[in-house]
Amino acid sequence: MAHDLDKLGLNTRSIHAGQDIDPATGAVAPPLFQTSTFAFESCAQGAARFSGEEAGFIYTRMGNPTVARLEEAVAVLEGGAGGLATGSGMAALTTSVFALLEQGGHVVSSSSVYGPSRVVLERDFARFGVTSTFVDSSDTEAVKAAMRPETKLVFVETPANPTLTVSDVRAIADIAHAHGALLMVDNTFASPILQRPIALGADIVMHSMTKFLNGHTDVVAGMIIPATEELLVRIRKSHFYLGAVMDPHQAWLVLRGLRTLSLRVKAAQDNAMRVAEWLEAHPKVRWVAYPGLASHPQRDLAAKQMDGPGSLMSFEVDGGVEAGAAMLDHVKLMTLAVSLGGIETLIQHPASMTHAAMPREARLSAGITDGLVRVSIGCEDIEDLLADFEQALAHV
Ligand SMILES: *Cc1c(COP(=O)(O)O)cnc(C)c1O
């Protein structure tokens, strides 16, 4: 690498990390190595690659130059020891839990995590004797109270989906470490431009790169970023045997998206602040949850541990589910779709969509009310966005 990227700013890192000039051809854009396997010059070389005596590629499930560029890029952005690219964000979670937990192990997690993250922990891992307890992790005392001798992992999402509650990463890292457990943070909502959990004490960061890191709503992808070499080696062992790895073409597309990450995140955040203030002042809107608003219960914590409140928010229209549906059915510029972190604004209804698999009781106790609407603000012109909200709310 031409520069010591760790010392450079985040804009520079997102543009240059993993983007070294190709030594073979001088290509400025990263080459796509769309191959499943790599030839050896001799049996001796093959043996040396397998034993690890010689660096080099063997087989794409175990490593690929295009995927390796992306792993390095995201690790540089997050300040981790390295990256392990996965086929989806869910694969980043399941691979990490599979690698780090034993039968009888216990996970403490946030009650309002991404819906499928909760389902896989509560239903699938439980079948193999790995159990989980979900607490409101914005309440640090609740995390402490849920810790058990067999707790090996604390897994939090902050800001959380879709309630936008913020958890204190540093305080939770201290609790986890005092109990001999690791802390993993799902950093999908903030992206490394706005929050770097490893610097706050987290042991592992995971991403759904489907969202901000790729940013163009055309790839499903994930990444695990362990803070230390020891954890990287430990998780890598399970990673390529489990096989939830990334295809080179996926990696190439995310590398392309990454180069504009900081521009996109900041443009969307500027829009989001305006939308949040506008919605909060609207007579048909009951409440708005956005970490940049004075009304947000953890606004000071968000300001302390993040470099900005991001571009996700949730709100409730007066009149509950029916009113929310009336609004959602009339958006024109915004798109009624799940997912987030793309350049376009997406709006959805968690109770009937992303969190529909959760029992209603659990959903309500996690703060996900029937009428809650989640919106991921994009990079459109702000006047056009506000006009769309205005005309859609007129149908309520
Ligand atoms: C989307 C998402 C996931 C899951 O990622 P996939 O790429 O869809 O598998 C996990 N966590 C959060 C916060 C997400 O938004």
Image (tube, rainbow, N blue to C red):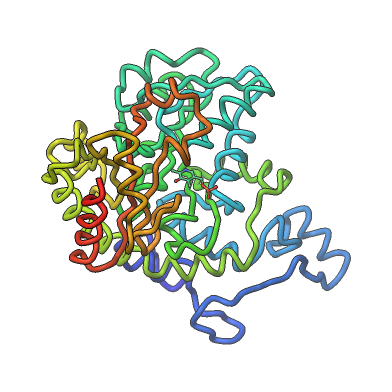
Judge left or right: residue 308 versus residue 378. Answer: left
Q: Residue at x 47, y 23 (%)?
A: 108
Location of residue 193 (image quadrant): bottom left
Q: Is residue 138 left or right of residue 27?
A: left
In the image, 242 versus 39, the foreground residue is 242
The answer to whether residue 73 is above or below residue 188 is below
Considering the image in quadrants, where does the C terminus appear? top left
Would you identify the image quadrant in which residue 306 lies?
A: top left
The residue lying at 59 percent from left, 86 percent from top is 25
Residue 203 in sight in this render: no
Question: Could you say which is closer to the camera, residue 80 or residue 266?
Answer: 266
> Considering depth in this image, is 241 or 212 the residue closer to the camera?
212
Residue 362 vertical placement versus 210 (above, below): above
Q: Residue furthest bottom?
A: 25
Residue appearing at x 66%, y 48% in the figure: 244
Percent across and percent down for residue 33 are 66, 73
Instruction: Point out residue 332 in the picture as x, y percentages from the top left corner.
Output: 33, 62
Residue 52 x %, y %: 72, 54
Q: Position of residue 209 (x, y in %)?
A: 48, 55
Q: Is residue 198 visible?
A: yes
